[in-house]
Image (spheres, rainbow, N blue to C red):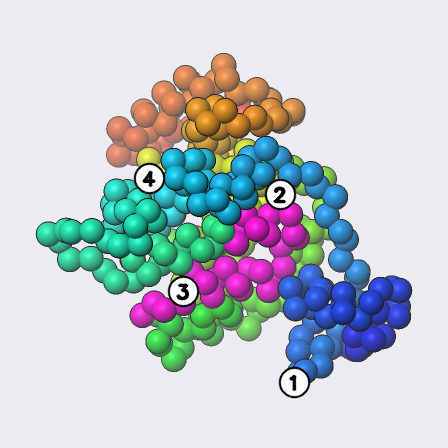
Amino acid sequence: MDYISVSEFAAKYGIPERTVRNYCATGKIEGAFLVGKTWNIPTDAFLPRRAKFKATPLLNALREQKEAKLAGSIYHRTQIDLTYNSNHIEGSRLTHDQTRYIFETNTIGVTDQSVNVDDIIETTNHFRCIDLIIDKAQEKVSEAFVKELHRILKSGTSDSRKDWFAVGDYKRLPNEVGGRETTPPEEVHRAMKALLREYNAKKAKTFEDVLDLHQRFEAIHPFQDGNGRVGRLLMFKECLANGFVPFIITDELKMFYYRGLQQWPQVKEYLLDTCLTAQDNYKALLDYFKIKYKPKKFFDRTEERSSLREIHEMAKSNAQCAAVTISSMKFTKERLM
């Protein structure tokens, strides 16, 4: 691949060199890298498009409350609920109350049980990741941004002290998820570059596009560890970026979520329905905090809420949750068409 300098890229598009350097430093120019103090930019790199997206009432509220450090707000609730649930799915033993206490007081509190130090560190790191996706919600997803989320999440953990573990960079050793093979380390950069190029090229992203990005990211599994949390943070960010009500995967939805990821290439309804159910839960929070949101055109699920919850409750009480058939969720596909 051929590369050009900052000055050549600036002349090509008629913009200041300072702007080009800023684009490179923030990962907005795909494939640009630094050698010493000199940026090398691929000759076929495009000029980043300026975001024209108008922030939603939710995003405005999250940003304002974040700056104000407003307790008892939607920002406060999102930080605790998203961090607790996303970490809990990955094996954290901290309780919801302990997570809340750490966020509110920056202390763990008194407990008669041993606490894993990594659980505490990753909890505080996850709070910082949420702040980042709020700040950068309107920026396109880049490899640099994805790596930055991973760097923040895993900094200071026991993993960061392992020679073979790359904090803030792609995996060095092969890994698997749920017994399934993932993308080999030597192919991760190419796979991620292709995924993000395809996703960012879509002008009007749909809710399904966001879920597709998430599923394919998890299938690649670009990092040695932390893929699930980084992936769910990206999904939350992209919901904010594209005007969709975001959502949080809770423990009661975990098995449906995992099955949805596995079945996505064949049956999209599993993951789609699970995420829409989680979205309903977050909408209830928005209603409580009186934050307006725009119902999406694909369908109004109000009338389906009770039947959805019946399906989830039935499967939750049944050890054979996989026996919930595709036909029981057919209405999702029919409503989307």
3D distance between C-alphas at marks 4 and 2: 25 Å
Per the image, label 2 sits on a secondary structure element best described as helix
First reached walking from the N terminus: tag 4 or tag 1: 1
**Location of residue 106 in the rendering, given as x and y in whole percent from the top left corner:** 31, 54
Q: Is residue 41 left or right of residue 240?
A: right
Residue 278, above or below 300: below
In the picture of the structure, the residue carrying the numbered disc 2 is: 241
First reached walking from the N terminus: tag 3 or tag 4: 3
3D distance between C-alphas at marks 3 and 1: 26 Å
Q: Which residue, as the protein is rendered here, is positioned at the far top?
A: 303
**Residue at 36% across, 69% down:** 156
In the picture of the structure, the residue carrying the numbered disc 3 is: 154
In the picture of the structure, the residue carrying the numbered disc 1 is: 36
Residue 145 highlighted magenta (yes or no) = yes
3D distance between C-alphas at marks 3 and 2: 25 Å
Amino acid type at mark 1: Gly
Amino acid type at mark 3: Lys
Q: Is residue 213 left or right of residue 89?
A: right
First reached walking from the N terminus: tag 2 or tag 1: 1
**Location of residue 90 in the rendering, given as x and y in whole percent from the top left corner:** 34, 52
Q: Is residue 330 left or right of residue 308?
A: right
Start-end of magenta stretch: 132-158
Q: Is residue 191 visible?
A: no
Q: Which residue, as the protein is rendered here, is positioned at the far front?
A: 68
- In the picture, residue 60 is in which quadrant? top right
